[in-house]
Image (cartoon, rainbow, N blue to C red):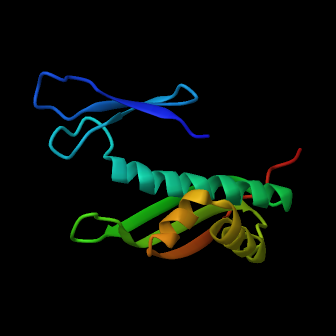
Amino acid sequence: MIQGNVTLTQPLSSSRQFVAVSGTGHATVLDDGNGDTGAKPIELMALGMAGCTAFDVINILRKKRQQVTGYSVKIEADQAVDPPQVFTKVRIHHIITGIDVQAQAVEDAIKLSEEKYCSVGVMVQRSGAEVHATYEIVQAPAPVTA
């Protein structure tokens, strides 16, 4: 079960800033564009999707014994114009740095994440969003041995 609590920080002001605390005790500030003191909830949804697939892909690449020395995921999401402003298109770009990382291993890891493991991604896709993933592999220099 996932749990959490979201509390308005300044109930007597016009501010809409909240502190969200996860069931595991981690806190983050939520705000809107006007207050701009924290991430908007919809931004956290996109970041959650990027983080979800990142965990999956790195775990799979490590199991495939790929020598990953760096990894990041960039995400962009378009939203519907009218409420509820759900995601309509999501673009995810994986940047994997490593030594002799195999493209097929990366493709397989991304596909497994999209189709089987990333619960956030599956929820976004089931809401009707079109998800498009790309990747690039950056060759890292081989370690220097003495």
Considering only vertical position in the picture, is 47 above or below 83?
A: above
Left or right: 16 in relation to 114: left
Q: Residue at x 44, y 75 (%)?
A: 128
> Which residue occupies the extreme front position in the image?
1
State which quarter of the image contains the N terminus.
top right
Considering only vertical position in the picture, is 57 above or below 80?
A: above
Judging depth in this view, the residue of 73 and 33 nearest the camera is 33
Considering only vertical position in the picture, is 137 above or below 44?
A: below
Judging depth in this view, the residue of 5 and 129 nearest the camera is 5
Judging depth in this view, the residue of 133 and 121 nearest the camera is 121
Q: Residue 9: percent from the left, percent from the top?
A: 26, 24
Q: Residue 85: percent from the left, percent from the top?
A: 28, 64
Q: Is residue 139 visible?
A: yes
Judging depth in this view, the residue of 105 and 21 nearest the camera is 21
Q: Residue at x 74, y 73 (%)?
A: 108
Q: Residue 140: percent from the left, percent from the top?
A: 69, 59
